[in-house]
Image (cartoon, rainbow, N blue to C red):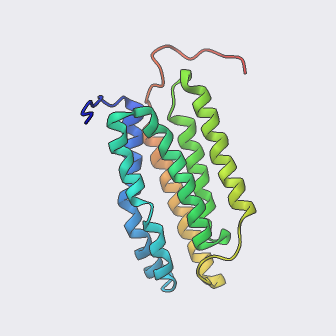
């Protein structure tokens, strides 16, 4: 049994913070649906399924910080794909892909730029898959319900992106000053 643990670098610490916040908020989403919509609560319980996977990221970080930083945007994108299937495209869940791409943009050092680029491309590919494989949601939401869900998800995405921006602010991605590089 490998008990080797590494201390977390600032980027990985930020990743762990975001993973914890997402994991701890997951159980409240069905409550929001119940309170704001009143219908489809049973269907919305599916949104909690990814919580254990988000919970695993802080534990992965202790053994492999880069895998944890890669995992968060991937888990987020796959969860967003599932949530979009659960709630439908009109619910605004696809907006969470923006937060996943933002995580890919801020979670890596300069020398990890190919991981960063590949991850951004993968999240975007999952978004395209979501757009192409849409269909009816698992629950038949009314137009009024979808409007409420859209408002809820717009607010949730804005909060998440603000949290990401604030948490990663000032987190150095490398020790040397940024220089212009060729693409």
Pinpoint residue 32: horizontal percent, then vertical percent: 44, 74
Relative to residue 2, is residue 178 depicted above or below?
above
Give the left or right position of residue 153, taking residue 172 as reference.
Answer: right
- Residue at left offset 44%, top offset 42%: 166
Of residues 50 and 158, the one nearer the viewer is: 50
Q: Position of residue 37 (x, y in %)?
A: 51, 82
Q: Confirm whether residue 39 shows in the render.
A: yes
The count of marks equals 0
**Residue at coordinates 34% horizontally, 34% vertically from top-left?**
63
> Of all residues shown, which one is farthest toward the right?
132
Q: Is residue 122 above or below residue 38?
A: above
- Of the 4 image quadrants, the one containing the C terminus is top right
Report the front residue among 165 and 138.
138
Q: Quadrant of the N terminus?
A: top left
- Which residue corresponds to the image point at 36% horizontal and 38% vertical from the top-left? 61
Q: Is residue 169 visible?
A: no
Q: Nearer the viewer, residue 81 or 14?
A: 81
Q: Give residue 62's position: percent from left, percent from top.
A: 32, 36
Residue at the outermost front position: 1
Q: Position of residue 105 (x, y in %)?
A: 57, 36
**Residue at the (43%, 30%) spot, across then down:** 171
Q: Is residue 182 left or right of residue 35?
A: right
């Amino acid at each position: 049994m490998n008990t080797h643990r590494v201390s977390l670098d600032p980027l990985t610490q930020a990743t762990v913070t975001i993973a914890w916040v997402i994991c701890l908020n997951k159980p409240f989403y069905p409550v929001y649906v119940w309170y704001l919509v009143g219908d489809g609560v049973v269907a919305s319980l599916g949104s909690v399924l990814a919580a254990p996977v988000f919970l695993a990221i802080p534990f992965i970080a202790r053994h492999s910080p880069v895998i944890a930083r890669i995992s968060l945007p991937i888990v987020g994108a796959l969860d967003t794909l599932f949530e979009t299937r659960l709630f439908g495209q009109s619910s605004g869940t696809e907006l969470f892909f923006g937060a996943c791409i933002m995580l890919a943009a801020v979670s890596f050092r300069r020398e990890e730029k190919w991981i960063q680029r590949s991850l951004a491309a993968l999240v975007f590919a999952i978004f395209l898959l979501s757009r192409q494989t849409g269909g009816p949601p698992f629950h038949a939401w009314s137009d009024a319900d979808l409007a409420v869900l859209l408002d809820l998800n717009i607010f949730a995405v804005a909060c998440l992106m603000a949290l990401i921006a604030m948490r990663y602010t000032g987190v150095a991605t490398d020790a040397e000053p940024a220089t212009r590089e060729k693409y």
